[in-house]
């Protein structure tokens, strides 16, 4: 799923590299940003989120919120980490109303493609993690070039960096 043009793409050959890419993105995120993570089970969405958390200065353990639905962490900006895997679209709307109304948060939503229409008003960045083998992942970034293009470039994740880390 794309929420605009593909603005950048990177390749990861390890969980550590996936976290590094997330950390690069986390370093340029701002209050009110919404990141929708898309990918199959085991693709690396939570590993990418651990990296985002590091980029936000969060030092605690970051785990998947699959069973609790939403976790919050404190860093230079608070992080709301949601997982929609077990939710219906109406339930996702409740998360949108409760959590995304706080403009001071960065919000990362795993399985964000399940209810992308609900979150579109937030001009999110879609991060698609595609499994290309046992360890290899292709990570594509799509969204509004006006909102996200400069920040992806600053993080080294723009089209110019396509294939970085391969």
Image (cartoon, rainbow, N blue to C red):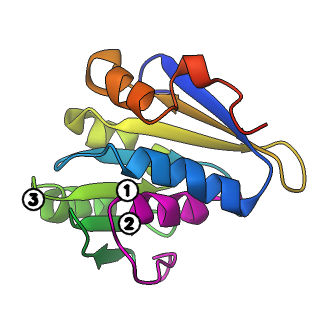
Residue of label 3: 102
* Residue 107 part of the magenta-drawn span: no
The N terminus: image quadrant: top right
Quadrant where the C terminus sits is top right
Residue 88 appears anywhere in the view: no
Residue that badge 1 annotates:
108
Q: Secondary structure at mark 3?
A: loop
Up-down relation of residue 15 to residue 160 (above or below): below
Give the total number of marks visible in the rendering. 3
Identify the magenta region: 43-67
Distance from Cα at disc 3 to Cα at disc 2? 14 Å
Packing grade of label 1 (10 A; few <14, some 14-19, many >=20) is many
Q: Name the secondary structure under disc 2.
A: strand
Q: Residue at x 68, y 62 (%)?
A: 16
Q: Quick one: label 3 or label 2, which is nearer the N terminus?
A: 2
**Is residue 118 positioned above or below 80 on the image?**
above
Q: Are marks 2 and 1 in contact (CB under 8 Å)?
A: yes
The label on residue 82 is: 2
């Amino acid at each position: 799923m794309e929420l605009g043009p593909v603005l950048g793409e990177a390749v990861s050959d390890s969980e550590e590299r996936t976290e590094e890419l997330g950390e690069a993105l986390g370093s340029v995120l701002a209050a009110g940003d919404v990141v929708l993570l898309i990918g199959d089970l085991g693709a690396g969405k939570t590993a990418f989120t651990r990296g985002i958390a590091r980029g936000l200065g969060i030092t605690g353990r970051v785990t998947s919120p699959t069973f609790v639905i939403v976790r919050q962490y404190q860093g230079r900006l608070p992080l709301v980490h949601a997982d929609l895997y077990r939710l219906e679209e109406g339930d996702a709307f409740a998360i949108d109303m409760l959590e995304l109304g706080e403009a001071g948060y960065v919000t990362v939503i795993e399985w964000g493609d399940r209810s992308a229409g609900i979150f579109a008003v937030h001009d999110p960045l879609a991060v698609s993690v595609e499994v290309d083998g046992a360890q290899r992942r292709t990570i594509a970034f799509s969204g509004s070039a006006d909102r996200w293009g400069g920040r992806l470039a600053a993080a080294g994740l723009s089209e110019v960096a396509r294939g970085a880390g391969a």
